[in-house]
């Protein structure tokens, strides 16, 4: 975290990336903006894992970092927004897992989440406050939740928390090696699972193409008959799908026979044949 600013109504946390060239054209940063509202909501509700991410990121290069309260947040199950934040800011996932392991064995404070329930909020409003909200709604035409909360905000006296359990480099260090090993194993399992799912999906698609091979051959010929670049591109895609599907089913010879007939029917279309060079038999 690079900055903190507070006013009577707002608190602003500033997170920033170093201005290195490999960040400047990062499309991931553009996609990240969709998660900002979720991250803000999590912080408001008392989910402070975002702040621990930045502490862990700094710890990766500074083992003399000041200690922070050790609060028992769930670091084994992150939200999509938190995962995106960790990826964008380069938060070391091995340290996140090490923190989760430390929290399982070391004493810590319970996490308190401030869930917003609209029914409870409405029941606490006076008739005057409700009238003010309705007046503002009719005058403005719309009223966001944050505007309504700001209009009915009541000052609260927050008792200072006496933290007894603190997270430091010395607390987390014994868990780092085993956390790194666990992370590698989990990533290997996740990769194997993803590859298996992709393989199954690919095989299902090839089976579908093979089962509908007559229709696909017909579509390929229809596209070739358009005698234009887009038609040749689509015909080429169909034929490459067919080649792979026949190969998957162990019927490569059947494909070669039918492909020869297709080439014979379209022998004058040189632009199409150029797109099929890798399927043509080698001399």
Image (cartoon, rainbow, N blue to C red):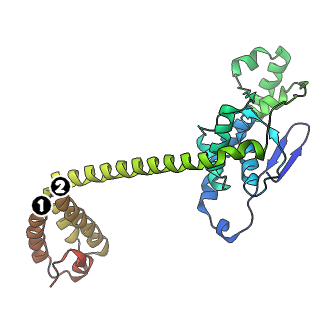
Could you tell me which secondary element the residue under label 2 belongs to? helix
Point 10% across, 73% down: residue:
260
Q: Work out whether residue 143 can be spotted.
A: no
Mark 1, mark 2: which one is toward the viewer?
A: 1
Q: Check the image and report above or below for 153 versus 194.
A: above
109, 127: nearer the viewer: 109
The x and y percentages for residue 215 are 16, 56
Q: Which residue is mark 2?
A: 210
Q: Does the CB distance between marks 1 and 2 fall below 8 Å?
A: yes
Point 60% across, 54% down: residue:
31
Q: Is residue 50 left or right of residue 239?
A: right
How busy is the neighbourhood of tag 2: few (under 14 within 10 Å), some, or many (20 plus)? many
Could you tell me which secondary element the residue under label 1 belongs to? loop
Q: Is residue 167 left or right of residue 240?
A: right
Instruction: Using the numbered discs, state the Cα–Cα distance from disc 1 to disc 2 in whole angstroms.
Output: 10 Å
How busy is the neighbourhood of tag 1: few (under 14 within 10 Å), some, or many (20 plus)? some
Q: Is residue 268 left or right of residue 85?
A: left
Q: Which mark is residue 120?
A: none
Q: Work out whether residue 277 can be spotted.
A: yes
Q: Check the image and report above or below for 49 versus 213.
A: above
How many numbered marks have been drawn onto this rendered protein structure? 2
User: Which of the two labelled residues, at mark 1 and mark 2, occupies the earlier sequence position?
Assistant: 2
The x and y percentages for residue 53 are 71, 47
Q: Is residue 209 left or right of residue 264?
A: right
208, 73: nearer the viewer: 73
Quadrant for residue 233, please give it: bottom left
Q: Which mark is residue 251?
A: 1
């Amino acid at each position: 975290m690079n900055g903190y600013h507070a006013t009577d109504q707002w608190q602003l946390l500033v997170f920033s990336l170093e201005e290195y060239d490999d960040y400047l054209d990062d499309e991931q940063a553009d996609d990240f903006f969709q998660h900002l509202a979720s991250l803000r909501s999590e912080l408001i509700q008392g989910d402070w894992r975002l702040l621990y991410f930045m502490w862990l990121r700094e710890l990766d290069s500074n083992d003399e970092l000041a200690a922070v309260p050790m609060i028992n947040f769930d670091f084994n199950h992150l939200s999509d927004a938190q995962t995106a934040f960790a990826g964008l800011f380069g938060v070391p996932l091995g340290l996140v897992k090490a923190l989760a392991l430390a929290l399982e064995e070391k004493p810590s404070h319970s996490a308190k989440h401030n869930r917003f329930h609209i029914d409870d909020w409405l029941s606490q409003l006076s008739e005057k406050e409700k009238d003010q909200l309705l007046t503002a709604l009719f005058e403005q035409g719309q009223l966001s939740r944050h505007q309504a909360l700001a209009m009915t905000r009541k000052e609260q006296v927050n008792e200072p928390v006496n933290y007894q359990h603190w997270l430091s480099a010395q607390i987390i260090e014994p868990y780092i090696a085993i956390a790194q090993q666990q992370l590698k194993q989990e990533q290997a399992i996740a990769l194997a699972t993803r590859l298996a799912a992709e393989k199954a999906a690919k095989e299902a698609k090839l089976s579908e193409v093979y089962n509908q091979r007559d229709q696909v051959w017909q579509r390929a010929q229809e596209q070739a008959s358009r005698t234009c670049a887009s038609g040749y591109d689509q015909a080429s895609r169909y034929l490459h799908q067919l080649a792979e599907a026949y190969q998957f089913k162990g019927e490569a010879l059947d494909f070669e026979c039918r492909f020869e007939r297709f080439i014979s029917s379209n022998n004058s279309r040189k632009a199409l044949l150029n797109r099929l060079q890798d399927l043509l038999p080698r001399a």
